[in-house]
């Protein structure tokens, strides 16, 4: 990691992996993106060009950021997921809000967590950023990258879980539904309600 990757190269590599390189890609499904009936089984494409994202640590969304009110709606939705506690992230920048499972609901594998010892499966970055880091099964991580909702974390599969992605913050109510669904899939994996092949 001595030489930072160009963003274009990272996006291109992610696209290639999404098409060819992740085991189980062909079985990745989104049947339970949310309880909301408006969400489709197939993950939709995110509209417009991809936001600029830093390629350094810490990874941040630099452009096209989520409005503050949508960030708060997203935080409220994710906080209401079953067995979720919130608090300062155990791994992110100051001000990032972590989503951690209670011990009783933590039945997923270690790879379902950004910080296994803290049971943190996702966190929301501070207001000027508004993106999230989320742990997903690699097939679903490939899906969200391919459809433009996320980029891979530079250390995913090296020092962090292979399916760690930065999910872009929502810009409108439709995107709020989709981002909620993506994080809900992470929650389902962390609670043992889904597997990489069926998430």
Image (tube, helix red, strand yellow):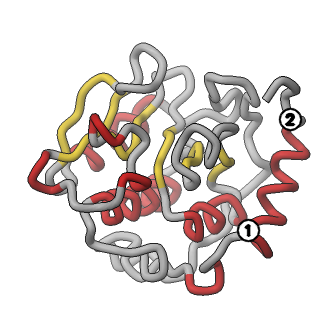
Image position of 133 with respect to 45: above or below? above
Query: Residue 3 is drawn in which quadrant?
Result: top right
Q: Nearer the viewer, residue 182 or 191?
A: 191
Residue at 31%, 58% in the rendered image: 190
Kindly identify which numbered label has been placed on residue 5.
Answer: 2
Residue at 72%, 34% in the rendered image: 53
User: Mark 1: which secondary structure?
Assistant: helix
Q: Nearer the viewer, residue 194 or 78?
A: 194
**Count of numbered marks:** 2
Query: Residue 59 is drawn in which quadrant?
Result: top right
- How many neighbours does mark 1 have within 10 angstroms: few (below 14), some (14-19), or many (20 or more)? many
Q: CA distance from mark 1 to mark 2?
A: 18 Å
Picture coordinates of residue 67 (x, y %)?
51, 33
Q: Check the picture and name the quadrant holding the C terminus.
A: bottom left
Q: Specify which label sits upstream in the sequence, 1 or 2.
A: 2
Is there any visible trace of residue 172 in the rendered image? yes
Picture coordinates of residue 188 (x, y %)?
31, 65
Q: Are marks 1 and 2 in contact (CB under 8 Å)?
A: no
- How many neighbours does mark 2 have within 10 angstroms: few (below 14), some (14-19), or many (20 or more)? few
Query: Residue 45 is drawn in which quadrant?
Result: bottom right
Q: Nearer the viewer, residue 122 or 172?
A: 122
Picture coordinates of residue 121 (x, y %)?
36, 46
Residue at 37%, 52% in the rendered image: 110
User: Mark 2: which secondary structure?
Assistant: loop
Q: Could you tell whether 199 is left or right of 139 in the image?
A: left
In the orientation shown, which residue stands out farthest toward the left? Answer: 104
Q: Nearer the viewer, residue 170 or 181?
A: 181
Kindly identify which numbered label has been placed on residue 18.
Answer: 1
In the orientation shown, which residue stands out farthest toward the bottom? Answer: 27
Residue at 70%, 57% in the rendered image: 148
């Amino acid at each position: 990691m001595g030489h930072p990757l160009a963003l274009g190269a990272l996006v291109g590599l992610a696209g290639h992996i999404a098409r060819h390189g992740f085991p189980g890609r062909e079985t990745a499904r989104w049947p339970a993106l949310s309880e909301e009936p408006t969400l489709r089984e197939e993950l939709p494409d995110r509209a417009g060009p991809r936001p600029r994202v830093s390629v350094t640590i810490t990874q941040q969304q630099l452009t096209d950021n989520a409005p503050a009110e949508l960030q708060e709606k997203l935080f409220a939705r994710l906080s209401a997921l079953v067995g979720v506690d919130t608090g300062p992230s155990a791994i992110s920048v100051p001000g990032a809000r972590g989503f951690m499972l209670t011990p009783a609901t933590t039945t997923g594998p270690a790879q379902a967590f950004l910080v296994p010892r803290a049971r943190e499966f996702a966190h929301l970055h501070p207001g000027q950023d508004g993106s999230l880091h989320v742990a997903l099964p690699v097939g679903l991580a490939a899906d969200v990258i391919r459809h433009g909702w996320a980029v891979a974390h530079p250390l995913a599969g090296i020092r962090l879980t292979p399916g760690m992605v930065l999910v872009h913050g929502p810009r409108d109510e439709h995107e709020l539904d989709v981002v909620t669904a993506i994080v809900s899939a992470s929650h389902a994996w962390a609670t043992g309600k889904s597997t990489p092949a069926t998430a």
